[in-house]
Amino acid sequence: MSAVLEIADLTRVHGKGEAAVTALRGVTLTVTAGEMVAVMGPSGSGKSTLLTCAGGLDTPTSGTVTVEGTDLGSLSRKQLAALRRRSVGYIFQELNLIPALTAAENVSLPRELDGDGHREARALALVALEEVGIAELADRFPDDMSGGQQQRVAIARAIVGDRRLVLADEPTGALDTDTGEQVLRLLRARCDAGAAGVLVTHEARHAAWADRVVFLRDGLMVDETGPAATADSLLHGIRR
């Protein structure tokens, strides 16, 4: 399968001098089309920083991030924003839905910003909302939805159109067990349909949905395991 995301020798240092904090230290990772990779590790290990760099929301101190053959470091801010709108879907912990927009408007916004007409963008939004099972809520505002419904809107926004890379940062953190499992099933289906996915999670049972699991500790990739790993071995990998 072709590589969608290629991260090579990625280092990210926040701050300067004595206040400098190294979030990532020479991390290398490739994710191919149809593959979901889970990223696990203790708090402060660099998981969220890895996602923000992978999605072009943060800039590496050194190393490269390539999405579908394009080196993000070679792009202008305008070109980078365009690539994110077209190719990268990001599911934030905080969801970041716009309260004044309906579900359909939240989902269609990236497409309209990328130049699609209102009707075309709404049609794509309705397809995405149907895919996550809440098409009937298209004209409802976020404040009139449950937490699980809002999470589904956020996922629909992340997959609307032909998003080839889906990045999810603890997407089930605020959800009950059943709703969380439904969210993971949706992400798994999107990867099975040809997207590449990276899932940050603390839960071994959630990581079990992935094809591979990588472990970060103190900004370093310290281990990697395949799909046959049990939940106990996943947890052991984090605690070693």
Image (tube, helix red, strand yellow):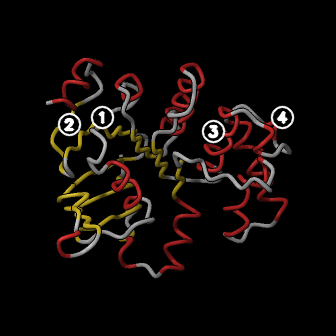
Spatial distance from mark 1 to mark 3, Cα to Cα? 24 Å
Residue 8, given in percent of the width and then of the height, sits at: 23, 61
Sequence-wise, the earlier of marks 4 and 1 is 4
User: Could you tell whether 202 is left or right of 99 in the image?
Assistant: left
Q: Are marks 2 and 1 in contact (CB under 8 Å)?
A: yes
Give the residue number, with chain letter if any, for mark 1.
212
Sequence-wise, the earlier of marks 3 and 2 is 3
Front tag of 3 and 2: 3
Sequence-wise, the earlier of marks 4 and 3 is 4
Q: Secondary structure at mark 1?
A: strand
Name the residue type under label 1: Arg
Mark drawn on residue 136? 4
Spatial distance from mark 4 to mark 1, Cα to Cα? 35 Å
Front tag of 1 and 3: 3
Q: Residue at x 75, y 53 (%)?
A: 99
Q: Is residue 226 above or below residue 48?
A: above
Spatial distance from mark 3 to mark 2, Cα to Cα? 29 Å
Give the residue number, with chain letter if any, for mark 2.
224
Residue 92, given in percent of the width and then of the height, sits at: 53, 49
Mark drawn on residue 151? 3
Sequence-wise, the earlier of marks 4 and 2 is 4
Sequence-wise, the earlier of marks 1 and 3 is 3
User: Could you tell whether 155 is left or right of 90 in the image?
Assistant: right
Crowd band around label 2 with a 10 angstrom C-alpha radius: few (<14), some (14–19), many (20+):
some
Q: Is residue 34 above or below residue 157?
A: above
Sequence-wise, the earlier of marks 2 and 1 is 1
Spatial distance from mark 4 to mark 3, Cα to Cα? 15 Å
Q: Residue at x 43, y 78 (%)?
A: 75
Front tag of 4 and 1: 4
Residue 16, given in percent of the width and then of the height, sits at: 23, 75
